[in-house]
Every structure is written in structure tokens, then in C-alpha cells.
Image (tube, rainbow, N blue to C red):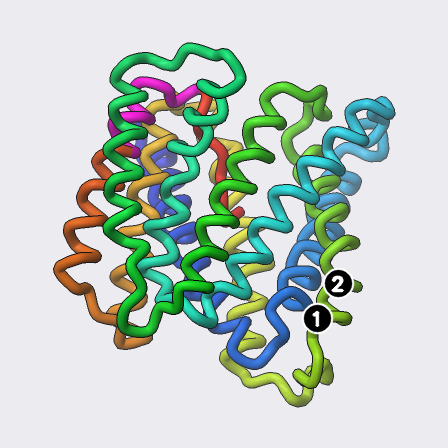
Amino acid sequence: MNARAWLALWTVYVVWGSTYLGIELAGETIPPVFAAGVRFLLTGVLMAGFVAIRRGRAPFRVGRNELASAVLVGVLLLGANAMLFVAERRVPIGLASLLIASVPLWIVLLRTVTGDRPSRSALVGVATGFAGIALLVRPGGQASFGGILLVLGSASIWASGSFLSSRLPLPADAFVATAIEMLAGGVMLLPLGLVLAGNEPLNPASWSGRSLAGLVYLILIGSLVGFTAYVWLLGHVPIGRVATYAYVNPVVAILLGVTFLGERVTWRIAVGATIVLASVALVIRNEAARVVEPFAE
């Protein structure tokens, strides 16, 4: 772990932990599903353009099976992320980040159901982690029960997409695969966002400066900078060290929620957070290579 590795790791810690705040701000005045569609479509275009400028068209020559797999995974992953955009209107970002941190637990559960054999320690971590989630899902304060269910649905669908991504043929280049996934998700979400917007304004002139800043941050920093740092880490740092982002991101999100949104950390959230994050740490320590998948990319 040299200075560059630590810088990249802390970039992932802070940037992906802060995307929960970016989602909250973007969704204040921009219709949430539409905001998610704009984010991922523009990110996909920028990422594809970056690859094309550096390496030409060759990396995009992928087979039909790889293309279809990337589209399917993109629809699942980014559809799950769009659900978080909607949910954060009803759930504090600290609580949302803790529930999303359960993604590795869902992946181990899916592996178990499909006949894989995770380690006994991982299964203990899953059982303990879901006990912590049960403590967290009791609505209270600013959180609605419907919003909490949306976040849990988001986590489980993201886990399903992550689970499939490890079993389907995807483009070998991580940036190309992600660009295709982003474009697929954006193409799906943008028209859906138009339909679901209802009476909410779609004119950018009606959106607040905070929302626009949040959306730009998500595109340029949350997706491009965060994902670039993550891909670099995968090639230079042991996977177990990279995987620690999964239980550091919620801590960053909680601190930002308290600092900028006035959110409160109740005893129930504190206890639930301790149980969930300890369980995720246990699972990742034993199953890092199979459960690491960036959520807020």
C-alpha cells in the first residue's frame, strides 16, 4: 500500500460514501427516476467516449452474448440504483446506506440458494447481518415503511445483478462493460422517468442549484472518478483491502447526513449499524472475491 494506493482507496471511501448525499440532493427537485436516467446515460456516453479516444473502437467489438449479458446486468443494477433515488425522498441517507451495505449478505444468500457452499463464517455473518437489518427496518423519524422496503428491494436487486455478472459472459474490459451497462440502464430509465414524473417539473430551469450540483457530482465524481479509482485498485491492491469500501461507505454517508442534512443517529440505528457493518466485514473477510461489487458507482 503505497501513497497512490491509499489515495485511490480513500477516493473510493469518500466518493462512493458521498454519492448518497448526491442522490438526496439531485432528487430534491428533479424527478428521481428521470435524474437516475440522465445520470447513467450521460455517464455511459462519457465513459464510452473516454475509451474510444484512448483506444479506438476495438474494445467495443464484443460478441452478442457479452453484449446481451451487459445489457441485462445494467438494467438490473441501475434499475436498483434508481429505486434508491426514489427511496431517499422518504429515508435518511444514513439509514439508506446501512441497508444498501447488506448487498454482500444478499449475494451470499443467493449463492447458498443456488447450490454454492459459502464458508460457515460467511453464513454466520449473513444470519447476524439480517438480524441487524430487522432492527433497522422499524420505521421511525423521517423514514417511511414504504421507503425502507424500496431500499431493501434496491439492495436485493443489485445483489441479483451482481450475482449474475459473475456467471454471465461480459466484455473483458471493465470500462467497456460498465459503459454498456450505464447506457442500457440510462436508455431504460430515461423514458420511464418521463412517465413517472407526473406533475413534477422536467424543465431544468425549475430545478434548484443544489439538485443540479448533486446530479453533476454524481456523473463526474461519483461515477467517473470513483469507478476509475476502483478499477485501478482492483489491478494493484489485494481484493480484501479493496472490499473494505463496503463497510466504510455507510460511515461516510452517516457523517454527511448528520453534517449537511441534520439527520440524527438514534440508539437503534447505532446498534443496527454496528451489527450490520460487523457482519458485512465478517462476510467480506471470508468471501471478498465473490461478493465485491460497487453499488454507488
Residue 265: % across, % down: 19, 64
Disc 2 is placed on an element classified as helix
Is 185 magenta? The answer is no
Q: Is residue 220 visible?
A: no
For label 2, count other residues whose C-alpha is less than 10 Å away and answer few (under 14), some (14-19) or many (20+): some
| Secondary structure category for the residue under label 1 | helix
Residue 95: percent from the left, percent from the top? 32, 58
Query: Within 10 angstroms of label 1, few (less than 14), some, or many (20 or more) residues?
Result: some
Left or right, 208 with respect to 201, comes to left
Q: Residue at x 73, y 54 (%)?
A: 186
Q: Is residue 114 visible?
A: yes
Q: Looking at numbered disc 2 in the image, what kind of residue is underneath it?
A: Leu
Residue, far bottom: 206
- Residue holding disc 2: 192
Vertical arrangement, residue 29 with respect to residue 129, above or below? below
Query: Residue 101: x, y in percent?
Result: 37, 43
Q: Position of residue 253 (x, y in %)?
A: 33, 58
- Predominant secondary structure in magenta? helix
- Is residue 258 placed above or below 16 in the rendered structure? below
Q: Which residue range is magenta in the image?
A: 280-289
Label 2 close to label 1 by CB (< 8 Å): yes
Residue on which disc 1 sits: 196
Q: Quadrant of the N terminus?
A: top left
